[in-house]
Image (cartoon, rainbow, N blue to C red):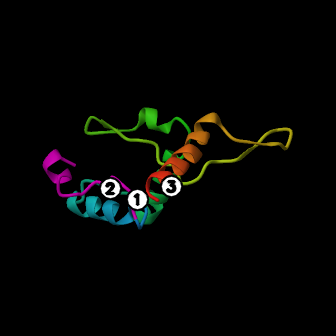
Amino acid sequence: LRTEEMTKVDAATCYVEDDGVETIEKMLKLSNNRLRMYGTARELAENVKIYRNVSGSHQFSEMHGYRLYPYHTTPNVYLSLKNKEYIWKIDVFVILQNIAENALYR
């Protein structure tokens, strides 16, 4: 989409109720069939959520020169080859962020 067309789509800067489905549908509609895909807007939103939840994905995410921040819903708990649960250091920041936000907005 061209920059002037993107200004018609409000970018979410906080929690989005429908996981961005409405925004994706609006972008597809405004693209005048230049932006097409297989599947639904909901499927794309779910895949973007999965991608952004991967640790380190924010290093490769940029839109119009603005870096996108990682979007984590919950920290991921992984299972090692020895069947022990572990969490990545970067995912600990999700927990800290949630604690800080809860403390600020009480």
**Residue 40 visible (yes or no):** no
* Numbered label attached to residue 6: none
Secondary structure under tag 2 reads loop
Q: Is residue 16 left or right of residue 79?
A: left
Query: Which mark is in front, 3 or 2?
Result: 3
* Numbered label attached to residue 102: 3
Residue that label 1 marks: 15
Bounds of the magenta segment: 1-16
Q: Are marks 1 and 2 in contact (CB under 8 Å)?
A: yes
Q: Residue 43 at what x, y percent from top left?
A: 47, 62
Q: Residue 88 at what x, y percent from top left?
A: 65, 37
Question: Does the stretch in magenta take in 8?
Answer: yes
Pointer 3 local density, CA inside 10 Å: few below 14, some 14–19, many at least 20: few
**Residue 10 visible (yes or no):** yes
Question: Which of the two discs, 3 and 2, labels the residue nearer the N terminus?
Answer: 2
The three-letter amino acid code for the residue at tag 1 is Tyr
Q: Residue furthest top?
A: 59
* Numbered label attached to residue 12: 2
